[in-house]
Image (spheres, rainbow, N blue to C red):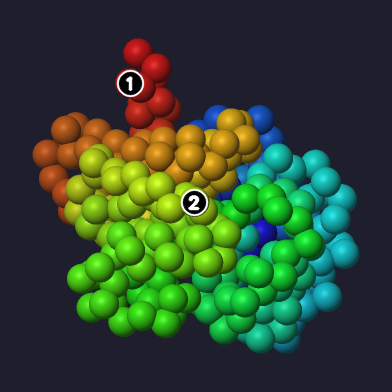
Amino acid sequence: MIGGSKGLSGAVIMSSLAALKAGSGAVLAAYPRSITAHFSRKLNEVIKTELDETPDGSIAGDSYTKILKQLSKADAVLIGPGFSLNPETANFLFDVISNSTKLLVIDADALTLLAGNVEILKQRKSESEIILTPHLGEFSRLSGKTTDEINANRFEIVRDFAKEYNINVILKSETSLSCTSDGKIYINNSGNELLGSAGSGDVLSGIIVSLLAQSGNVITAMICGNYIHGMLADIYYDKYGNKQSASQQDLIKLIPAAVTEILG
């Protein structure tokens, strides 16, 4: 897990917790040192790496070489939750995208930064798989299409984008879809309005990177990750009878129940 910045520590913490609950054998987190105290209090099970930071508390631009050892241990990498939009941090992101040989999930603020240099996806040194997890607004910035254009023709626009940049896309909306780099599209049918609240995407990205690490398969991670994430909202509604009161931590605690239901 790579992310976090001053004032935005919760996102990468939630992603880390979700990955643990989804079955990761180990979770390593790299983040700017100013948010270390938050990790120390809340994530005893996570292996932690402090990184140098910018004056505003985001990851310093020259941090790539400092996480090479951690990257070498990882089966899959998530970058972006709580990342901030600092231009120096963007340089770090581009280093990771250009050089990483690992299965990679790009989420949240990292998607907004990527929209400013989307051609970096074509300059990767490795052909390892990448999953982008944008909501409609983020995908609008990435694709250059308006949200109205995307809503009117989302399958074709997402498919063209995935093929052009040789990446996989989970487009999050009221009905989320997964699109592979060769244009296959899968529609998720689980979930409800609970998933529209802040932080929901951080939980989803944590589940996806965990499944990606466990399976090594992009399609498995996208389809099962979306479905399990939706199940959390469905299980909560079945248990409590409302679609308003769940926090993201409430949903994370339901991941074992969702997994057990699937395995049963």
Query: Mark 1 or mark 2, which is nearer the start of the sequence?
Result: 2
Q: Secondary structure at mark 1?
A: helix
The amino acid marked with disc number 2 is Asp
Question: In this orientation, does residue 90 appear?
Answer: yes
Report the number of numbered marks: 2
217 relative to 9, above or below: above
What residue do we see at 51% from left, 53% from top?
A: 181
Badge 1 density bin: few <14, some 14–19, many ≥20, Cα 10 Å:
few
> Quarter holding the C terminus?
top left
- In percent of width and height, residue 63 lies at 81, 69
What label sits on residue 63 in the rendered view?
A: none
Q: Which residue is mark 1?
A: 261
Residue 146 at x, y = what percent? Answer: 31, 82
Residue 253 in the image: x percent, y percent?
40, 36
Q: Is residue 185 left or right of residue 113?
A: left
Element type at marker 2?
loop
**33 up-or-down from 43: above or below:** below
Q: Residue at x 39, y 17 (%)?
A: 263
Which residue of the protein is positioned furthest toward the top in this rendering? 264
Q: Which residue is mark 2?
A: 182
Which quadrant would residue 24 be assigned to in this image?
top right
Q: Residue at x 66, y 30 (%)?
A: 25
Residue type pointed to by label 1:
Glu
CA neighbours of label 2 inside 10 A, class few (<14), some (14 to 19), many (20+)? some
Q: Is residue 51 left or right of residue 207?
A: right
* Relative depth, front residue between 236 and 123: 123
Residue at point 60%, 55% (across, down): 130
C-alpha gap between disc 2 and disc 1: 31 Å
Residue 85: percent from left, percent from top: 57, 81
Q: Quadrant of residue 136?
A: bottom left
Image vertical order of residue 89 relative to residue 108, above or below: below
- The answer to whether residue 201 is seen in the rendering is no
